[in-house]
Image (cartoon, grey):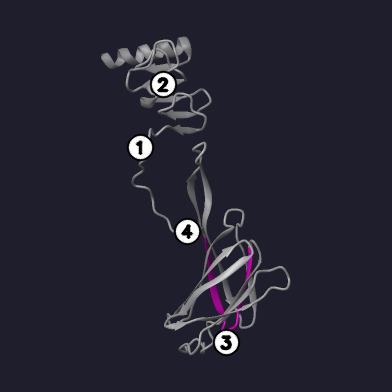
Amino acid sequence: MKNLFIILCLSVYSLSYGQIGINTANPQGSFHVDGGKDNPALEVPTSVQQKNDFIITSSGNVGIGNSAPQRKLDIDANGSSLRITNLSSQSQTNNDILVKGNEQGDVTRIKYSYSATVESIKPGESASVIIPSNNIQSGILMVKSKNSCKRSMISSYIFSNMTLAYVNSVARDKVGSATIFLSSNGSSARWSVKFNNVTGCDDGGNGTQFDYSIVANTTNSYTITNNGNVAKTYILTFFKL
């Protein structure tokens, strides 16, 4: 009976004023909950009084700890952390992360990682990949390949716009040796990576099978060349710094 009476009162209030207030006779939006029951009867709640409020405005903005939300979800955390549990876990080749701006506190998404696979490049041939450079202008590049004998090659680079810097590489137990060739056409320096005495594989790969070279043509275009003796598939993964 008590619950029915409360619902009836809220309905009457809503019909009369187009707003619903819980624990407050002075709602600041379409739906306003004053958790601490400390809002004034007439004036706008102070910033301290708003800390325990929840509101939905006529424009659909939601405020928590803030009775005048300026975004779809506007939270004043009052110095505490935000908690989200039981999120799903996914493994994707193209990932974004959420970042918070210092001035306005706006949460937006930016590109964090991007992977591109180039299939079966024949010996002496090249292939190019395009990355979303608007969000990954600098970061870490990982180049990976493998053979049918379950041996893998991995190399790492640091890049920033048109600068590409080699870090290291290994093909199973063989450390790579990198040679730099300076640019003459506006591209980055080209890196040629070789692995001496790599164990042969029954797919036909000999000691040169993992050798390759790579260059950044533009800020969002990279070309990789297979310098080995058998066709190779390469995976290029870019991580934002």
Q: Element type at marker 2?
A: strand
**Magenta part of the chain:** 221-239
Q: Element type at marker 4?
A: loop
Q: Earlier in the sequence, mark 3 or mark 2?
A: 2
Q: Earlier in the sequence, mark 1 or mark 2?
A: 2
Tag 4 and tag 2, C-beta contact below 8 Å: no
Q: Element type at marker 1?
A: loop
Q: Earlier in the sequence, mark 3 or mark 4?
A: 4
* Residue highlighted by disc 4: 92
Image quadrant containing the N terminus: top left
Neighbor class of circle 1 (other Cα within 10 Å; few <14, some 14-19, many 20+) is few
> In this rendering, is residue 55 above or below 175?
above
**Residue depicted at x 52% and y 29%:** 70
* Residue highlighted by disc 3: 229
What secondary structure do most residues of the magenta stretch adopt? strand
**Residue depicted at x 47% and y 11%:** 17
Of badges 4 and 2, nearer the viewer stands 2
Q: Element type at marker 3?
A: loop
* Residue 225 part of the magenta segment: yes
